[in-house]
């Protein structure tokens, strides 16, 4: 990281201007924090030691650089955290979709354009604004793209508190937002951390379909539907398949039922509005996509992360949980001899859920 020009800079005034530029670029809030995260580092190390990261080996790969920004990017003095709302609206419709047999539930963040591209581009523009003001300075832009404890940094920057479900919550707008960071060598004044307002509420823990929130502020990713349907690339453990219901990419239950999300504001960012009717799509329709259709319809979106094979795996589980046996089993039987053993396994399980007459005979 290169060093900032030595010419005189009023860093308090600069911090205020940075926040103004952030709002102009479409961020709902910016905050500034230091780099110290000792308690969060210990929490991370305990979580890793308990193997609660599952197959996400990248969580271990970078060691303590994840919790020490100045080791990840030498010269870092401050982290500018930014949040951008993505909630597309329709809490009732989203909740209703969870019980709508034959239809797919896709995490609300994945319905539009891939947020990485949106936030990264705007954070880069923010850095350019700063450079025009102070001259060359050291910085790196991150949007869920490096080993960064972004929720802890955002909390310390005053953007919200980490809830019992381990998501960041803002008292004015809930938790439906993305985070991005600008690591910098500018000695900017830091903001006050946000206070925790979860109180005695445990709604998120009560509604989690797989009981992945094993204790307040403790998530076992190996039980989490978001992990199982996106990060996990193997066979979904049978014990969780019924609980997955119709969630084919991610899970929002802990946010949908969080009382603080009654304050959620619909995103003004057009890139985050639903594409291709994915906010109310029939499982059979999605299951019938060819790989070429999958790649075309998910272009530029987060759904690409799961890959076509796991996409079919996830939908097979959802079809196994659907109430309309005739429609579901017709679609499933069409994939019964799929080249992928992973897909065939989940199709066979799904058919068996509809009764002996539909099960594949050995």
Image (cartoon, rainbow, N blue to C red):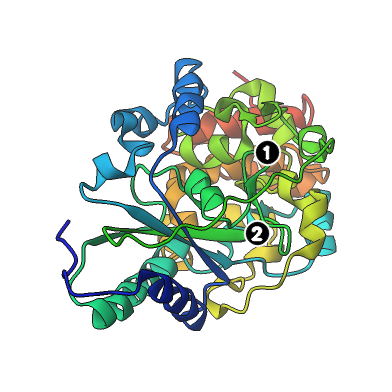
Label annotation for residue 13? none
Asked whether residue 206 is in view, the answer is yes
Residue 342 relative to residue 263: left or right: left
Q: Is residue 351 above or below residue 109?
A: above
The first of marks 1 and 2 along the sequence is: 1
- Residue at (68%, 64%) from the top-left corner? 279
Q: Residue at x 61, y 74 (%)?
A: 273
**Within 10 angstroms of label 1, few (less than 14), some, or many (20 or more) residues?**
many
Residue 176: image tag: 2
Q: Is residue 256 left or right of residue 166?
A: right
- Left or right relative to 298: residue 279: right
Say if 178 sits above or below 47 in the image: below
Q: Residue at (62%, 45%) from the top-left corner?
A: 167
Give the spatial CA distance, label 1 vs label 2.
13 Å
Expressed as whole percent of the image width and height from the top left, the position of residue 262 reads: 82, 61
- Residue 187 location, quadrant: bottom left
Q: Is 347 in front, or is 189?
A: 189
The quadrant of the image that shows the N terminus is bottom left
Residue with the mark numbered 1 = 165
Where in the figure is residue 29, as x and y percent of width and height? 56, 68
Q: Secondary structure at mark 2?
A: loop
């Amino acid at each position: 990281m290169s060093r900032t020009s030595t010419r005189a800079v009023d860093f308090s005034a600069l911090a205020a201007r940075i926040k103004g530029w952030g709002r102009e670029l479409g961020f709902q809030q910016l905050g500034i924090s230091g780099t110290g995260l000792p308690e969060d580092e210990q929490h991370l190390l305990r979580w890793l030691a308990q193997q609660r990261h599952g197959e996400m080996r990248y969580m271990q790969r970078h060691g303590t650089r994840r919790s020490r920004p100045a080791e990840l990017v030498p010269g870092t003095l401050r982290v500018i955290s930014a949040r951008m709302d993505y909630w597309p609206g329709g809490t009732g419709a989203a909740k209703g979709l969870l019980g709508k047999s034959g239809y797919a539930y896709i995490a609300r963040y994945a319905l539009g354009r891939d947020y990485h591209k949106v936030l990264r581009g705007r954070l880069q523009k923010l850095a350019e604004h700063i450079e025009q003001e102070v001259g060359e300075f050291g910085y790196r832009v991150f949007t869920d793209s490096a080993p960064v404890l972004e929720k802890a940094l955002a909390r310390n920057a005053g953007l919200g508190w980490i809830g019992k479900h381990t998501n960041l919550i803002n008292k004015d707008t809930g938790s439906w937002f993305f985070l991005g960071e600008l690591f910098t060598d500018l000695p900017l004044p830091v903001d006050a951390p946000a206070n925790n307002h979860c109180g005695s509420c445990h709604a998120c823990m009560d509604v989690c379909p797989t009981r992945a929130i094993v204790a307040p502020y403790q998530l076992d990713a190996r039980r989490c539907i978001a992990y199982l349907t996106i990060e996990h690339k193997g066979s979904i453990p049978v014990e969780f398949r019924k609980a997955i219901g119709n969630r084919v990419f991610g899970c929002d239950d802990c946010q949908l039922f969080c009382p603080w999300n009654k304050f959620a504001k619909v995103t003004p960012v057009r890139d985050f509005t639903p594409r291709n009717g994915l906010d109310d799509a029939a499982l059979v329709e999605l299951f019938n996509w060819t790989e070429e259709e999958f790649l075309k319809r998910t272009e530029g979106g987060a759904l690409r992360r799961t890959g076509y094979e796991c996409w079919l795996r996830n939908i097979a589980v959802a079809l196994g949980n659907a109430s309309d046996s005739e429609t579901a089993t017709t679609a499933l039987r069409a994939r019964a001899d799929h080249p992928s053993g992973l897909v065939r396994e989940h199709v066979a399980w799904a058919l068996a859920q509809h009764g002996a007459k539909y099960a594949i005979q050995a």
